[in-house]
Image: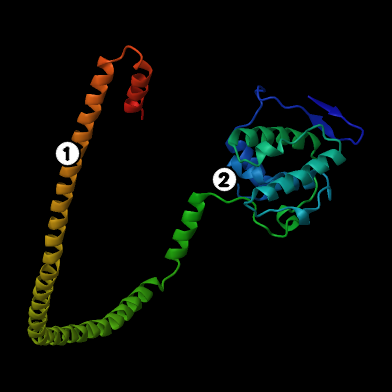
Amino acid sequence: MSEKSKTSVVNVRYTNKLSSNSSRAEMLSWVNNTLKSQFFKVEELCTGAAYCQLMDILFARSIPMQRVKFRTNVEYEYIQNFKLLQGCFNKFVVDKIIPIDRLVKGRYQDNFEFLQWFRKFFDANYESREYDPVIARNGAMLGLGSPPMEAKLRKSVNKSNPQTKPTEESSAQTDRATTEPKNQVYKSNSENKTIEEASAQTDMAITEPENQVHESQTKTTEKASAQTEKATTEPDSEGSIEELRNYCKYVSRMKQERNFYLSKLRAIDHICQKYNSGRDRVILEKITKIIYSE
């Protein structure tokens, strides 16, 4: 379905239920043939550069091609390309809002649906004219290319290089030339190692008597220190024992005095309880109160 606008641009409406929709391979083949590009996946169209050049084919100088980022892998430059495309849509009153936020994420379904719509829009508005897409983008590559093709290219380059084998032989000779001095260095290092071991044994023979003398001196010093400490601590221990004995005697005397006065208080309390009647009652109650007061 299409309709003419006042600027002679044919607007199209797309639905994925149409039976005339092309396959992924057909769509990629159309883009690559039209732009002389090397797109291998539909997701690569998320940069927006291909659509900008397709619009330049439809409407000459409709997009400033020098501002299009053809070789990019950053999202903010994808967005810049799609904004250029949306500006061109607005200029020619194209009835389509580009889902930029979804397209720049590189998801297959979103990019494939937009590509199918754009193919219908392109076919409805295309008028044949001379156009070299490579020159128009100043020779910039468009698309990452097919990995199998790149592998074949590397293989053909290796076959066409006859100097590979001599280079490998010269490399082997160079390796041997570099390893021989290393072996000599290793041998000299081994000799040095033997000399170092002999020197270490000599040092050990010299230092062992010194270590024995040092150990005996250390043991003698420790023994003398222990005896001195014992001699100094023995009087202190005897003094502490004597103080403890005196303290025990003092506690014993205090208990005796406590029991003596306690027995006197009990005797007084007994008398107060016995004569708690008559005219002396008030005095006896006061005495009892004093006895049990805190």
- Callout 2: helix, strand or loop? loop
Q: Nearer the viewer, residue 152 or 142?
A: 142
Q: Position of residue 171 (x, y in %)?
A: 35, 76
Compare residues 77 and 212 and report the one nearer the observer. 212
Residue at x-position 53% and y-position 49%: 146
The 10 Å Cα crowd at callout 2, few under 14, some 14 to 19, many 20 or more, is some
Q: Residue at x 70, y 45 (%)?
A: 48
Residue ranking furthest to the right: 6
Q: Position of residue 238 (x, y in %)?
A: 11, 61
**Residue at numbered disc 1:** 256
User: First in sequence: mark 2 or mark 1?
Assistant: 2
For numbered disc 1, what is the local secondary structure? helix
Residue 40's tag is 2
Q: Is residue 219 above or below residue 201?
A: above
Q: Position of residue 249 (x, y in %)?
A: 14, 48
Tell me the number on the disc at residue 52. none
